[in-house]
Image (cartoon, rainbow, N blue to C red):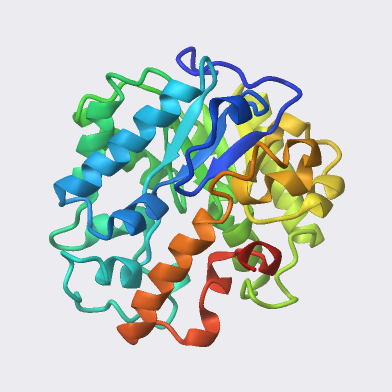
């Protein structure tokens, strides 16, 4: 385990945030912030990383979270926006290829760095700089397929002076297959992304009954990744829009090896319902607003709104 990131409280799951800033009292009921979904902050800003207001909003958000988490870890995942999400930001225009036949596996997350005029360097610079004042901040690479993508991202961060802890999101089956090699890059944190891992393993859309988090093939991959991380001394967390039934299907994982979405928290921890009420509808609100822009631009069919984000109907309302 990287010494710069404290161990999670053994008995407590971490929380996944999508733009929310929970109270300090709520955060004491968690094992830390296991995932900050940066794309929701970008959606809220409405502009890309090249815009100073976006950089300021994210910096202020992370400062607020860091100030409320005492000695707990804070893990930020780099923006996982699809090309069409980026296309409807105020300063983006509509770049060629914004309408992709398969956006879930298209130019998203770190892959946007391959496009001319990418804003990825702006995000890299911003987080590297911010880490100097937020010592418990760890950074996570999203939607990576193998160790080379992790190494390239880590190298870029180091070139901007980042010296903190690194993590990787395992949500593509090839990343699960290459988990040992990914761990060789020096990461100390593994996030298993159940939404994409399930869909890509089973060839199933999130809005269908075929998208089954508890399918044996999916559970086998989760166990493989978790066991590899443990052997290497890396922390592992299972994240996604699953319900308590997934936790029950993985009894060999401790509570601290899960990261529950803030808007779902009370379903897992009913005693915390009042503490988890603040901004509990924010993620759905931000996603609905983003989807409305996509529909208006002709980049999303209205019937697919929100469900494609993996949010469950009970959360959306």
Quadrant location of residue 13? top right
Residue extending farthest to the top is 3
Depth check, front residue: 304 or 121 = 304
In the image, 285: left or right of 156?
A: right
Return the x and y of residue 165 as percentages of the image width and height: 42, 24
Residue in the picture at 83% in, 53% down: 245
Position above or below: 184 against 218: above
Q: Nearer the viewer, residue 143 or 305?
A: 305
| 217 up-or-down from 167: above or below | below
**Residue 56 position in % (x across, y down):** 23, 40
Closer-to-camera residue (100/316): 316
The number of numbered discs placed on residues in the rendered structure image is: 0
User: Is residue 87 placed above or below 33 in the rendered structure?
Assistant: below
| Front residue (pair 304, 228) | 304
Quadrant in which the C terminus appears:
bottom right
Q: What residue appears at the point 27 percent right and 71 percent down from the top-left corner?
A: 88
Q: Where's residue 49, x and y in %?
A: 22, 50
Q: Quadrant location of residue 256? A: top right
Q: Residue at x 59, y 57 (%)?
A: 173
Q: Residue at x 67, y 69 (%)?
A: 313
- Which quadrant: the N terminus? top right
| Residue 281, quarter of picture | bottom right
Q: Is residue 317 left or right of residue 93?
A: right
Residue 268 position in % (x across, y down): 77, 44
Residue 158 in sight from this viewpoint? no
Q: Is residue 311 visible?
A: yes
């Amino acid at each position: 385990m990287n010494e710069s990131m404290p161990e999670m409280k053994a008995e407590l799951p971490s929380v996944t945030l999508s733009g929310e800033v929970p109270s300090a009292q709520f955060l004491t009921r968690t094992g830390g912030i296991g995932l900050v979904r940066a794309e929701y902050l970008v959606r809220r800003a409405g502009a890309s990383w090249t815009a100073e207001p976006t950089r300021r909003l994210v910096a202020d958000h992370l400062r607020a979270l860091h100030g409320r988490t005492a000695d707990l870890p804070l893990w930020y995942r780099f923006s996982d926006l699809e090309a069409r999400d980026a296309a409807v930001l105020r300063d983006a225009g509509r770049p060629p290829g914004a309408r992709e036949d398969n956006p879930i596996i298209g130019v998203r997350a770190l892959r946007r760095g391959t496009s001319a005029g990418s804003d990825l360097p702006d995000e890299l610079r911003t987080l590297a700089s911010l880490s100097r004042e937020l010592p418990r901040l760890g950074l996570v690479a999203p939607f990576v397929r193998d160790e080379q993508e992790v190494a390239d991202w880590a190298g870029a961060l180091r070139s901007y002076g980042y010296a903190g802890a690194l993590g990787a999101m395992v949500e593509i089956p090839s990343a699960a297959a290459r988990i040992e090699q990914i761990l060789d890059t020096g990461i100390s944190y593994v996030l298993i992304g159940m939404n994409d891992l399930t869909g890509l393993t089973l060839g199933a859309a999130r809005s269908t009954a075929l998208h089954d988090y508890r399918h044996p093939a999916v559970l086998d991959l989760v166990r493989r990744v978790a066991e590899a991380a443990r052997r290497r001394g890396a922390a592992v967390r299972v994240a996604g829009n699953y319900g308590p039934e997934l936790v029950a299907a993985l009894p060999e994982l401790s509570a601290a090896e899960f990261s529950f979405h803030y808007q779902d928290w009370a379903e897992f921890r009913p005693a915390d319902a009042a503490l988890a009420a603040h901004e509990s509808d924010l993620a759905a609100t931000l996603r609905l607003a983003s989807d409305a822009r996509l529909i208006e631009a002709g980049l999303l069919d209205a019937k697919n709104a929100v469900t494609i984000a993996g949010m469950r109907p009970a959360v959306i309302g």
